[in-house]
Amino acid sequence: MGSKWRKVKLALGMNMCVYVPRASEDPSPSINVTERFSDASLASSLDSPLATSSICRPTTPTPSSSGLRLPKSGPKPSKGACAICLTTMKPGQGHAIFTAECSHSFHFHCITSNVKHGNQICPVCRAKWKEVPFQSPASDVPHGMTRISQVSWPQDDAWMRVSRQLLFPQGDASRQSLSLYHVPEPAVFDDDESLDQQPLLNCNNDDADNKPIDMMEIRTYPELSAVPRSASHDNFTILVHLKAPFSVGRQNSGGNETNSPPSSQNSRVPVDLVTVLDVSGSMAGTKLALLKRAMGFVIQNLGPTDRLSVIAFSSTARRIFPLRRMTNTGRQQALQAVNSLASNGGTNIAEALRKVAKVFVDRRWKNPVGSIILLSDGQDTYTVNSPSARAGTNYQSLVPSSIHRDNAAGLKIPVHAFGFGADHDATSMHSISEMSGGTFSFIEAEGVIQDAFAQCIGGLLSVVVQEVQVKVECVHPSLQIGSIKAGSYQTSMRANARMASIHVGDLYAEEERDFLVNVNIPVDCSSDEMSLLKVRCVYRDPITKEMATLEEKETSEVKIRRPEVSGELAVSIEVDRQRNRLSAAEAMAEARVAAERGDLAGAVSVLDRCHEALSETASAQAGDRLCIALSAELKEMQERMANRRIYEESGRAYVLSGLSSHSWQRATARGDSTDSTSLVQAYQTPSMVDMVTRSQTMLLGNPSPRRTLRPFKSFPARPQAR
């Protein structure tokens, strides 16, 4: 009987969704989004019942041969009477309707008054709620309870009319939602918005116009400062350190940055961004609502020269929004498209990526930077569905050749993949990001979707150099390059291993890269000093479009002393630090292989041995912060390999996200992106930190109580010339 009653309750609650009735007349004047609303108020509108259309209880996904289920009408209002005031709940009466987790519905103002006095039990079924609606600030939420939304709910009908105008400026929301799906997709996606007569840069400071970026910084550190003449030294390590310049906007910006989009403050190159969003059945309810809010944050922080396209996928994929510039009108249309999304069906990642590749291939105009954000909480049930494919042998089929980084004629568009929750296929998402040159992030908790997106676009909106290549050339006639430790970056050697290059690609403002070059030093009794390498960097200035060459400033060559006799010399802390980073990454990769074989005890042992070895190094004993973070990360991975269930739910994704971060030396979200022990902070740039802070601040419209983490610097600042 209990099971039958539960099924009846689920059936009754299945279509009871939060709904805001449309007033018959709306006398409110039109609103200029940028003049009248801050990001905080926009977030509130996105979290309103109208913006999310419906926050329903998740249902079992139902594969559909027709792909995305198209809404046949607007949002369905809850039926019946409010159990508190006993009046009928009908559309058009100017009241928001709240549907509780037990599926019973009430007028929003009635239920908020009820729970305000400490009653967190459903008036109908007496179920105890975990989430309660409050109109008061978050500080008023009773201990142990969770708000339905982390932003303020609407206080009156006038506010609701304002939010409706903001999101749907051209009329009825349901009709707008329908029109998005019923407009036929063109055969060729050449309908992208023109970039004609658009400025390349977004500048506040007139003096910054046409100002070239500052020079990149390149520094070298030999492992030892001296090697005796009579001794040879195999695998002698030289660290090559790159640092991208400040963006012009960060150097010249002033005033309050909280109330205006970063795109209006920074002088930077514009972006073509395509977001690929999973709207399968498993995304129903809170997941989809939070995804819409995160997309609202992305939309509001793109500038008028940036362009955005949105692709939604479930059993099939559809472009729901073409490449459009994020002007005020473009933002409104993009918000409308995102808030029209409904969840249903399976998960077809391969078709979604083919669709996004088509957007980039067919576009008539090109912004200097192009990127893809992919989010999914499931496994591809259409392309990669065999045991051998799950083992990693068939993931190539997921990524179109046009966005594959190994394709010489490809677009070089990275896919930044976000695996959401415990059920996503972390191996496939990591493979997609690696094959395209992007990063893989693991979003463990629903509440950090927006922060994870914020960190990603904080980097994408701060690209300052492109097509970066590091070129290394041996100087001494007997010297050869043994190996280059560059992670996932492509390297090439030529001229009998006397010349090598590292293909780095784009760098964000103030982003750093470290590469270890190993050489074999021969015996040399002819001089007191030996020249080892020349290092230079070639890159494209995205402002002037010209190629620039940078050589190591302090010395034109990397040199060491060759004394008759040398006492014991200390290893360079900078070199030791990067060796530790690489050793930790290698241990993580080895542990992952063991875990996939089912040998979790062996995997934990590998990580434990690395942790012990790390603690004995010179940089760790000196209290180096990178080493401390590495130790914490290794311990976290051991805990996530405690048993098979934990590893399947979060361990695999956590390890793969860590490997992605280390191999690209770029920040990824891992678990809770605000975790102070996460090594993600080591690779965060100031632009990323600023954007994450902005995301956390706008949730409540006030500074967030969560700690704002600043990146630490691996290298001391260069002394200023006197």
Image (tube, rainbow, N blue to C red):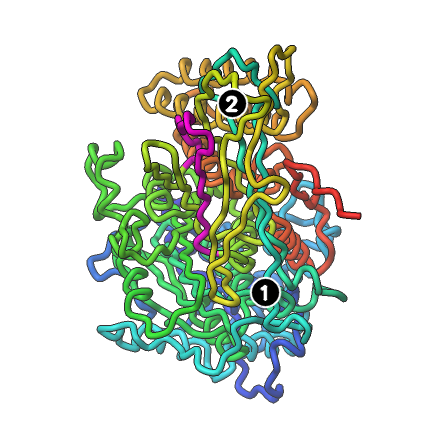
Residue 31, position in %: x, y? 61, 82
Q: Which residues are magenta?
A: 466-487
Instruction: Classify 223 as above or below 167.
Output: above
Q: Quadrant of residue 527?
A: top right
For the question of whether residue 149 can be seen, the reply is yes
Is 408 or 275 nearer to us in this picture?
408
Q: Which residue is mark 1?
A: 212
Q: In what element is the residue under mark 1?
A: loop
Residue 20, position in %: x, y? 53, 71
Q: Which residue is mark 2?
A: 639
Looking at the picture, which amino acid does disc 2 mark?
Glu
Looking at the image, which residue is at 64% across and 41% down?
554
Looking at the picture, which amino acid does disc 1 mark?
Pro
Residue 493, position in %: x, y? 34, 36
* Among numbered discs 1 and 2, the one appearing first in the sequence: 1
Residue 221, position in %: x, y? 59, 31
304 drawn magenta: no
